[in-house]
Amino acid sequence: MAAALTSRKARGSPGALGTGILRGLEAAPNMSCGCRTLTAGLIPPDATLYFDVVLLDVWNKADTVQVSTLQHPAHCPRTVQDSDFVRYHYNGTLLDGTAFDTSYSRGGTYDTYVGSGWLIKGMDQGLLGMCPGERRKIIIPPFLAYGEKGYGTVIPPQASLVFHVLLIDVHNPKDTVQLETLELPPGCVRRAVAGDFMRYHYNGSLMDGTLFDSSYSRNHTYNTYVGQGYIIPGMDQGLQGACMGERRRITIPPHLAYGENGTGDKIPGSAVLIFDVHVIDFHNPGDPVEIKVLSPPPETCNETAQPGDFIRYHYNCSLLDGTKLFSSHDYGDPQEATLGANKVIEGLDTGLQGMCVGERRQLVVPPHLAHGESGARGVPGSAVLLFEVELVSREEGLPTGYLFVWHEDPPVNLFEGLDLNKDGEVPPEEFSTFIKAQVSEGKGRLMPGQDPEKTIADMFQNQDRNQDGKITVEELKLKSDEDQERVHEEL
């Protein structure tokens, strides 16, 4: 009976021998050295031999690269293709688990082109179709790795290689900026163009989801001109065409971001950047006030608010993202102002002019006609303001420089009218009594919107030219006469 090679003992599952498994083998004499003796005298004749075997590697010429996905991201914006540039982490082992290399120990990703001969053939194949954030196990037979020669002292000849790979990001040198609209507000009437100044919030992350910066953490928008080179080229491109209030995702390849060198300690070289952006507002330095009539006046309107008029109006003021700033309704009474007197911001003054009593308007005021780059209490710098205004009342103003005007011609002998006790001089009391009588009798009117007592006191001060507390006939002059004298002097 012929003897056979038998398994004496195995550690692991019975059946085929796998790598890393220790198995004991028993060889009968006729299956080993038989009656022959080894010259060194180590194996006697007719000896039965016992072998403890560990299988280190096994492959077949028909083998291909074996790929198994260990973890797949929920969102896959693109997959690896030939000629792409990839950044990935890896642990490399032999088939028996012996580690030979890892990118993690070097503190940085392995960065290279795929399908261009920079990698072993098996890795070129194993990376194809991978998503950023995906984890794969890639087993490569030796003829698609380092073959008969191996590599240095760490990879022996004819070794199969096992790579556990985490793909960080991928791009192609031909890639452009990719835009994805996440939320588009209704009624977008204007889109950002080059030269606009924009305020926006953002979260910036790498392709694997690592956050590298956020404006929200600073509780302040990022403010900049668009298309003027103040920001990275990809962001310059990605912000153009956005609407106020829009949320969009901007994916920027490294050649339109920070390139091969990266920046700081949070953006590595050759990194693809993803920005989730919320556009708060934008404007152009040449923008005027935008006026939209929300409701016309209830009755026919023949007179509108003009510079110099004293008006009362209600208003609501907010940012373009809906953040409420101020409202006259919070105080109960309407706001009061004299138009054209620098009592309110320029844009609001402009938007109130031409209104009829009872009319409601919406005003969009750019920052250069509001509170500018510095902002004001409660108003961010460079903020576009949205007003809803309603004109409650209007009093016709006076010509520039006038504190009081007569509806008809002034009295023929004005000084006699002022000099109530006929003593040849007019003290403040007589002056005030006369002016108030003119107003109450409907013969004249004071500048609206100011304290009448202060206005009359200012008028007296203007006429009391020697500041002795009384007006004489020589001192008294109408403003129209003063203006005429000034014209003659200039001529």
Image: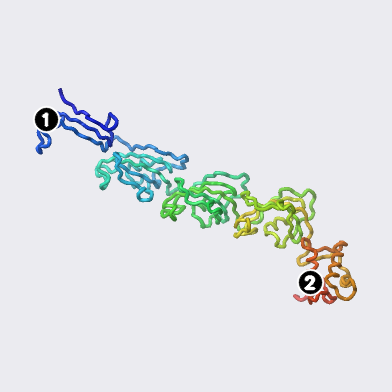
Identify residue for label 2: 461
The answer to the question of whether label 2 and label 1 lie on touching residues, with beta carbons closer than 8 A, is no
Residue 228 x, y percent position in the rendering: 53, 57
Q: What crowding class fits label 2: few (fewer than 14 Cα within 10 Å), some (14-19), or many (20 or more)?
A: some
Q: Residues within 10 Å of mark 1 (few under 14, many from 20)?
A: some
Q: Is residue 209 left or right of residue 336?
A: left
Residue drawn at the location 56% of the way across and 49% of the way down? 278
Q: Which mark is residue 6?
A: none
Q: Looking at the picture, how far across and down is residue 310, in whole percent?
A: 76, 59
Number of marks drawn: 2
Q: Earlier in the sequence, mark 2 or mark 1?
A: 1
Amino acid carrying label 2: it is: Gln
Q: Seen in the image, is 417 located left or right of residue 381?
A: right
Quadrant where the image shows the N terminus: top left
Q: Position of residue 323 (x, y in %)?
A: 63, 50
Q: Name the mark nearer the viewer: 2 or 1.
A: 1
What sort of colour scheme is used for the picture?
Answer: rainbow
Looking at the picture, tell me which residue is in the foreground, 172 or 423: 423
Looking at the image, is 209 positioned above or below residue 423? above
User: Which structural element holds mark 1?
Assistant: loop
Q: Quadrant of residue 226?
A: bottom right
Query: How much space separates mark 2 and mark 1, taking CA atoms?
Result: 139 Å
- The amino acid type, in three-letter code, at marker 1 is Asp
From this viewpoint, is residue 363 visible?
A: no
**Placement of the C terminus among the 4 image quadrants:** bottom right
Tell me the number on the disc at residue 46. Answer: 1
Q: Is residue 488 left or right of residue 265?
A: right
